[in-house]
Amino acid sequence: MTNTSDPLITALRTISGPTVTSDRDDIGRGLFVGSGDSLAACLLLERFGHRAQSAGDLAWIAGLPPGYDTVVGVSHSGRTAATVQAIEAARTAGRRTVAVTANSSSPLARAAHSTVLAPAIEVDEKIPAAGYIALALAALAREGIDTRGAAAAVADGLALLTDCPTPVDERWPIYPPDAISVLTLPDLRSAGDFWSLKLIEATGLCVRSVPLEEAGHVDYFIGPQSHLSIHLIGSQGTARHHRLAQALAGNGHDVVSIAVPDPATAGDPMWSEIAMAAYGAYVAQETALRWDRPLFRGGEVPMDARHIQTPTGGS
């Protein structure tokens, strides 16, 4: 396997799986809530009939949406204030609650009825992806998915992607556009959301993730300002992606299509999607270098996240 020296790929091959601290009984219909990278991980659960929603939608409104048996709060630190408050509100309302976190002593873990402990992925990253991977695996484990060998499968998929010629070198526009759209079908929706977050962190540009067909209805009106359209393509809908890509290119957009490599699509599609998402961090960093955009706006943006974290408890 290539890229054996890549720190994240190496770390993924050595970690243990998520730890579920209670029986893996059925959570019924679940509402998975998180923010940022955590919300991107939550989106994976929608393929099982659950719903992913911003934690702030629950934390800062009165009442919880009807029809959900369990509310699952997802936060790597366990200190994201909106996620903690959403779980507290759900518990007060008599709902069953679960915490998915890497910190077993965090406010989120203390607030929930049970906890899934995300695996520790020890790696230094300029644009982080390890936390997303850990939370994705942990949330899937709580759903009852067998995650044995999943981290290694994600590593395999990520190695395939990073071994391909980087799209930034050959197909990216020379100069930064005014905005970027990341287009996906549901099989890569979590990856698309994660790509948009990483591109924002790396470049400071306006980036959005959008369902493919909605882009088909709207995006070709964008202009005359420059616009980059990134198509993330899984095992389905390839022809539709290509038709829309041609239409957008014909209207003056820079268009780049990135497909999951064929060997990766032969395994579990969830591991391919997580790998594609993590690949977004690599591409985002290369994009910033190409356009001479300093990461996190050159350190001008405070990264301590105090404005979104609980003021006390945890770490």
Image (cartoon, rainbow, N blue to C red):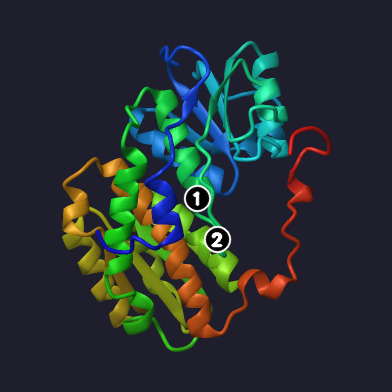
The residue tagged 2 is: 125
Q: Which residue is drawn at 51% across and 74% down?
A: 179
Front residue of 292/208: it is 292
Q: Position of residue 56 (x, y in %)?
A: 66, 39
Badge 1 marks a residue whose secondary structure is helix
Mark closest to the chain's N terminus, 1 or 2: 2
Q: Which residue is drawn at 65% across and 32% down?
A: 58
Q: How crowded is mark 1: few (under 14 residues within 10 Å), some or many (20 or more)?
A: many
For residue 62, above or below residue 114: below
Q: Position of residue 250 (x, y in %)?
A: 28, 81
The residue tagged 1 is: 130
In this rendering, position of residue 127 left or right of residue 300: left
Q: Do the residues labelled 1 and 2 touch (CB within 8 Å)?
A: yes
* Amino acid tagged 1: Ala
For residue 59, above or below residue 2: above
Q: Which residue is drawn at 32% across and 73% down?
A: 256
